[in-house]
Image (cartoon, rainbow, N blue to C red):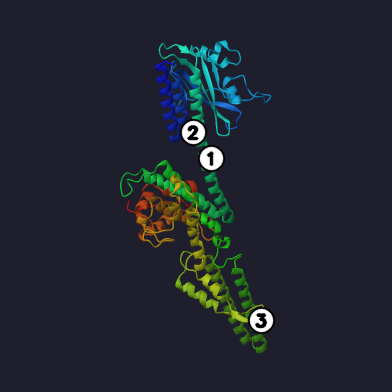
Amino acid sequence: MSDSSYTDIAQRLERLTELSVELSTNHDTPLLLERILTAAKSMTHADGGTLYITREDKQALCFNISMNDTLGMHQGGTSGHKIEIPDIPLYTATGAKNLSAVAAYAANTGKSVNIKDVYKVDVFNFSGMRKFDETFNYHSQSFLTVPMMDHENDVIGVLQLINAKDTATGQTRAFTDTDQRFIEALASQAAIAMTNQKLIKLLENLFESFVKLINIGIDEKSPHTGRHCEHVPELTMMLADAVHEIDTGPLADFRMTANDRKQLWIAGLLHDCGKITTPVHVVEKATKLETLFDRIHVVDARFEVLKRDAEIRALKEKLAAGSDTRRHDEINRSLADELAQLDADRDFLRFANIGSEAMSPDAQKRVTDIARYRWIGPDGFERDLLSEEEVTNLTIRAGTLNAQEREIINNHISVTIRMLESLPWPKHLQQVPEYAGGHHERMDGKGYPRGLRGDQMSVQARMMAIADIFEALTAKDRPYKKGKTLSESLEILGGFVLRDHIDPALFDVFIRKQVYLQYAQRFMDPAQIDEVDVYKIPGYTP
């Protein structure tokens, strides 16, 4: 072997080594495929080359990239020029393996095919190649076709090179055995790299599907919570994109990589995964007296007993009064007043049971006064109209959850954090627990579960806090409230800014970049989207 041959082999080995390193670090699949074909052409001094990828259904080879130096042709890949060539079927109409097309033969047999002159071989069908030559006034001669096999020995693609060139004369030559061995080595390395990328993608898709599976489970328990788990990540990403684009203010330097976006999206999907452990009767508590059913109907029955007893008492008084019509009139008026008062008190309790933004102290006192009415139960014993537990629930100041139930609900974030921190997150996803676990913290450090201040949280966690609150305010499918209008929601959200609950800089971007409107147009009922006067939003300076 001549010195030049040794030099050429050494250069090829060095190039193969460099490419192997590149294949292991390049995560851009289209660019990776193009680098494979370019390197193969360079190592064999080929004039042209084509890279085929096996179709998902394993029934055909798809043209992925095609290059030809003499014709100045570059199709597919990163060229922007679509390849208008039909796929090569791997099977015939009868189901037999297609062995007539050289690329299909290599794919079906797993063997390389090295042809010195295609015009002198009648084993394969080269009608397509001949038509190509006629169309472009080109002369195809030497072919090297190498299958690309994955770790399960399945063909994932085919690498085909055309017209090797003699570097000294520029004349077309046959591909040598050395050429073939190097391209087979390259194809093997390329197949490993491509398979690794595919497996990583499959694992990522599997993981995201698993995340969605958790949300399906939550949705089965509580449909409105399931939708919340879908909408919060969407809104979070809208806000993240808006912050990413600004170049002034406290967040001017904030930027997100593709991986940052992936982490934030996954965190958004998982931010309430702990609710899968929350009892349904707490999550779905639509009224203050609801457990497995709404106990306001039991209270209604007690009022009917009180009214019945009042009527019986009135009848007894009339019997005692004999024929005294004046006394009868007094009894009737007294009974009517008592029944009217009982009806008013019952209606009041029905209204109190619904829950509101803030129950007044006077309303709470009225509940305790009504609770002291005495009635006789089915067991014949007299007791207060309302139990202590019923009074506790009916005097809930805001919403429908009592203190114990609120603690159960709040515990979902602690469970979320424990669930997420128990997972062996890879390096590129290690921020997911922090992003997801901070959406109930507050800027002033009075949030839960860890009492973190704003400067102890990432920007992403603070974004999710805003998204979580805004989605909850506007959601129209909650069992305990109606969805608020856009202007009402922004007014309440602005109040959170003034109380040092959420990040004012993020809130500024949320309003200034109209993130709220972008979200509203996608997810809110049109009836909720009213006119917003930004000059009236608390905590915001236009």
Horizontal and vertical percent for residue 166? 44, 13
Helix, strand or loop at disc 1?
helix
Residue 163, compared with residue 226, is above or below; it is above
The answer for how far apart the CA atoms under marks 2 and 3 are is 81 Å
Horizontal and vertical percent for residue 416? 49, 56
- Name the residue tied to disc 1: 202
Quick one: 491 or 313, which is closer to the camera?
Answer: 491
- Amino acid type, label 1: Leu
Mark closer to the chain start, 2 or 1: 2
- Name the residue tied to disc 2: 193
The answer for how far apart the CA atoms under marks 3 and 1 are is 68 Å
Residue 265, compared with residue 12, is above or below; it is below
Residue at image point 58% right, 12% down = 121
Q: Name the residue furthest front.
A: 1
Badge 1 density bin: few <14, some 14–19, many ≥20, Cα 10 Å = few
Residue at image point 40% right, 44% down = 241
Find residue 380 and name its label: 3
